[in-house]
Image: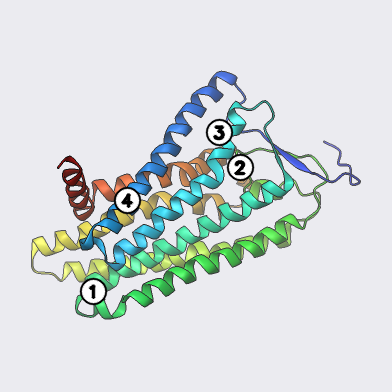
């Protein structure tokens, strides 16, 4: 058993990363650099198209703009550090930088959970109460919902980060991860972490599970409404506006719930790093592809934008 020096205070953490092999590190660097550039470019294109196209000035695309901007922030919090570690000689991060990365990464992840819940509510109102949609989802309401999602997530992340970082860290300082995430940092605390873990679990229930339950209920109501429609084309049109959102929800929530709400006895499983790759790297990259390939409005706006450039 590794001894702990209680007189020593950790000033930096060392990342183990995804692979210790130099050749594999180079392959991963090229792959994740490509993913990162594709994520930023794809989400910037989505934001630009929505801002340029008058037909897309609706609540649904207002929240999609928020989601695209969020994905850029989310992946930029973690991936540049990971890429630097892959080509650097020393895979370390100062304690203060680790704290900053953990806070913003957790905040952006929480915001995405709430935003996906709000987007499900938007689809519910549009399909189940179409006559009242413009009144219920008016511009000020959308702005307030977005502000609530961002501010509540930043505050919740602050609570978790303060509790996590106020614990004593006196060695070892090896993080079996590629970025500073709460579960991996907590394992290095040289004291009982049960209270902090309980707080993390409770906040996860509020921020992760409750929006997920809200999404589930919204889609149950949507399905009930769609099944009552007489027109097959109406059913198809209603469901087609939901498929992109459902795909993103499945990708993000499936991996996030597995990571943050599984038993601690299984939380040291090395596969947790692979799961983290999905919701920190792959999901932000896939979001613009999902919304552009499966959304007729976005594809139409993209075609019109390309046509204008060629003229």
Between 38 and 158, the one lying in front of the other is: 38
- Are discs 2 and 3 less than 8 Å apart at CB? no
| Residue 92: numbered disc | none
Q: Which residue is mark 4?
A: 46
How far apart are labels 1 and 2 at the CA level? 42 Å
Of labels 2 and 3, the one closer to you: 3
* Residue 128 disc label: 1
Q: Where does label 2 land, which residue?
A: 179
Mark 3 residue element: helix
All told, the count of numbered labels is: 4
Outermost residue, right side? 7
**Nearer the observer, disc 1 or disc 4?**
4
Residue that carries the numbered disc 3 in the rendered image: 83
Mark 3: few, some, or many residues within 10 Å (few <14, many ≥20)? many
Colour scheme of the picture: rainbow
Whether residue 206 is visible here, answered yes or no, is: no
Between the C-alphas of marks 2 and 4, the distance is: 27 Å
Q: Residues within 10 Å of mark 4 (few under 14, many from 20)?
A: many
Among the two numbered marks 2 and 3 on one chain, the one whose residue lies closer to the N terminus: 3
Q: Position of residue 286 (x, y in %)?
A: 36, 44
Check if mark 1's residue and mark 2's residue have beta carbons within 8 Å.
Answer: no
Residue 237 horizontal/vertical position (percent): 16, 60
């Amino acid at each position: 058993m590794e001894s702990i020096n209680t007189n020593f205070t950790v000033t930096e953490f060392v990342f183990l990363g995804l692979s210790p092999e130099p050749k594999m590190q180079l392959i991963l660097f090229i792959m994740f650099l490509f993913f990162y550039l594709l994520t930023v470019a794809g989400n910037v294109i989505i934001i630009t198209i929505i801002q340029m196209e008058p037909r897309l000035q609706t609540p649904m695309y207002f929240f999609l703009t928020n989601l695209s901007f969020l994905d850029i922030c989310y992946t930029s919090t973690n991936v540049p550090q990971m890429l630097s570690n892959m080509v650097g000689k020393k895979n370390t991060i100062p304690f203060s930088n680790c704290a900053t990365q953990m806070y913003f990464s957790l905040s952006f992840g929480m915001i995405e959970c709430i935003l996906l819940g709000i987007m499900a509510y938007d689809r519910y109102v549009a399909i189940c109460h179409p006559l009242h949609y413009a009144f219920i989802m008016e511009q000020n309401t959308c702005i307030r919902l977005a502000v609530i999602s961002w501010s509540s997530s930043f505050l919740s992340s602050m609570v978790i980060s303060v509790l996590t970082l106020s614990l004593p860290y006196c060695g070892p300082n090896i993080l079996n991860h590629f970025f500073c995430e709460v579960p991996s940092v907590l394992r290095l605390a040289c004291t009982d972490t049960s209270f902090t873990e309980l707080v993390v679990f409770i906040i996860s229930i509020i921020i992760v599970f409750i929006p997920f339950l809200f999404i589930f209920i919204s889609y149950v109501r949507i399905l009930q409404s769609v099944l009552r429609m007489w027109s097959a084309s109406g059913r198809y049109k209603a469901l087609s506006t939901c498929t992109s959102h459902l795909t993103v929800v499945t990708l993000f929530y499936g991996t996030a719930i597995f990571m943050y709400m599984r038993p601690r006895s299984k939380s040291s499983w090395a596969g947790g790093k692979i799961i983290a790759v999905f919701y920190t790297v792959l999901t932000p990259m896939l979001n613009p592809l999902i919304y552009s390939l499966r959304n007729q409005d976005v594809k139409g706006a993209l075609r019109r934008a390309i046509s204008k450039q060629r003229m």
